[in-house]
Amino acid sequence: MTEPTIYELSSPGRAGVTFPDPDVPRAKLPDSLLRADLPLPELAEVDVLRHYVNLSKYNYNVDGGFYPLGSCTMKYNPKINEDTARLPGFTFTHPLQPIETVQGNLALMYTLQEWLKEISGFTAMTLQPAAGAHGELTGVLIMRAYHKDRGDAKRVKMLIPDSAHGTNPASSGMIGLDVVQIPSDARGNVDLAALKAACDETVVGLMLTNPNTLGLFDEHVEEVVKIVHECGGLVYGDGANLNALLGILRPADVGIDVMHFNLHKTFSTPHGGGGPGSGPVGVTEKLAEFLPSPIVGILEEGNDDMPPLFGFITQKKTIGRVKSFHGHFGVIVRAYTYIAMHGADGLRQVAEYAVLNANYLRTRLNKTYRLPFDRICMHEFVAEGKVEGSDIRALDIAKRLMDYDFHPPTNYFPLIVHEALMIEPTETENKVTLDAFADALIKIAEEAKTQPELLHEAPHKTPFGRMDEVKAARELVLCCWLPEDYEKK
Ligand SMILES: *Cc1c(COP(=O)(O)O)cnc(C)c1O
């Protein structure tokens, strides 16, 4: 089943738009811009609309169904976020406007910085980074700048637990640091003996995800931080899993020195399909002057009659800019809205329900699927996608779930669990949905024994069946269609 392309639907002379009269004098386009040989499709508005609406139905989406994508916190995005992000006062501003004319935007950014500080316990904040991985890069640059500033140039190693997201070693590798992998112990914590052995005076720091990607809170987090600090290193917190901690634990309180947020995960701004994201970075006092600049600050204090004057501040030892202008403002507005709507109590409830939902699913499934670390989890857990007495793999289970109208969970990550199925329900799903999902996974385990071919060949209900995933990733066809005689013209 394939949808005809917009070119195949084209019919000469059909038109979809009528341009309004220009409010500026008409001018001729330069000849160099006019290309008679460009095969532009000709369609009516209704043809275009139906084409794209039909294509959009091929996509699974969080507005259409459950999305238990571990490590990604794919929660439902309240539509009020979209309303506020579309307010003309925000959309019709430009980052190069004089600050006096964008005080509202700056006040919003300043307030969000303050809220993120309160949530995390950090002293200073930048909203510039474009996503989590970009926040990591910013954070490791800050860590290195801090050591260099102290005249300590021999630190070249970053310690990273084996349960970390791939972006952690990538961010460290990008700035030329040597990555040293630290194993996990039998309970899924950082292996303390291995950490001690790796800590010396060449260590920039440790990148710690807590809860980690197994969905487990490290039972010795304070000990881990202490070991790294004792050898002069800093601790980077990967804040992608903050959804489990909101209102319960402030990462700075356990000694984390620098951390990125994923506004597009924890604070419900859409990120399916690759963005845009936002990865603010928070730091403790001693790292504050290294933050990317400028950051939003108060230039003149306000009083009863006058609001404060917001503007931009440059940190003394800044690592420089990491993003053009001031980050992804639309995402920042959405996160602001989400936090304002929830308030402190609401945010704590988010974390409590996220953890409750994950543990509910875990205990419904742990008799059917083996859980390598079957202890109370945080917002997610990892199961093995195997069924005893069958040759079924995690991939088969993931594909079969699509026939039951569920988005598959993350699979084959984290790498330390064979045939990993990483399940994160989030707080926005109710018990009926969670039960339906658990029932589907239990049914699939039965099918694995009685009708394994059903799983091997799944999915059966989607517009396209089982894909060659390697080929799809390696031989991406980006230009979908050109008329056969295009080259010749
Ligand atoms: C999502 C994620 C990242 C990367 O964040 P992006 O915004 O996708 O760049 C890093 N670490 C963990 C644990 C994550 O889940």
Image (spheres, helix red, strand yellow):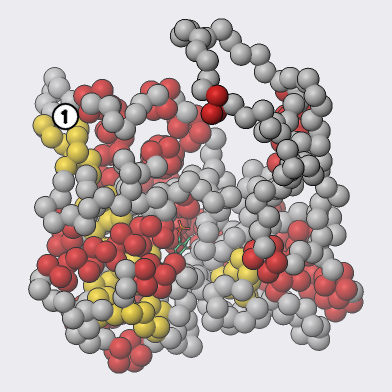
At a point 78% along the width and 21% down the height, the residue shown is 14
- Asked if residue 112 can be seen in this view, the reply is no
Quadrant into which the C terminus falls: top right
Q: Residue at x 51, y 48 (%)?
A: 275
The location of residue 192, given as percent across then percent down, is 34, 87
Q: Is mark 1 within 8 Å of ligand 1?
A: no
Q: Position of residue 241 (x, y in %)?
A: 44, 62
Query: In the picture provided, is 134 more to the left or to the right than 274?
Result: left
Q: Quadrant of residue 252?
A: bottom left
* Left or right: residue 131 compared with residue 145: right
Does residue 232 sit above or below 120 in this rendering?
below
Q: Position of residue 67 (x, y in %)?
A: 63, 55
- At 76% from the left edge and 36% from the top edge, which residue is drawn? 7
Work out whether residue 232 or residue 7 is closer to the camera in this orientation and state it: 7
Q: Is residue 229 above or below residue 474?
A: below
Farthest front residue in view: 488
Q: Residues within 10 Å of mark 1 (few under 14, many from 20)?
A: some
Number of dots carrying numbers = 1
Q: Quadrant of residue 319?
A: bottom left
Residue hosting label 1: 308
Q: Observer-nearest residue: 13 or 227?
A: 13
| Quarter assignment of residue 405 | bottom right
* Amino acid on which the number 1 mark rests in the picture: Pro
Residue at coordinates 62% horizontally, 59% vertically from top-left?
Answer: 68
- Residue 433 placed where, x, y %? 69, 53
Q: Please, what secondary structure does the residue beneath circle 1 have?
A: loop
**52 with respect to 262 (left or right):** right
Q: Is residue 303 visible?
A: yes
- For this view, does 344 lie left or right of residue 452? left
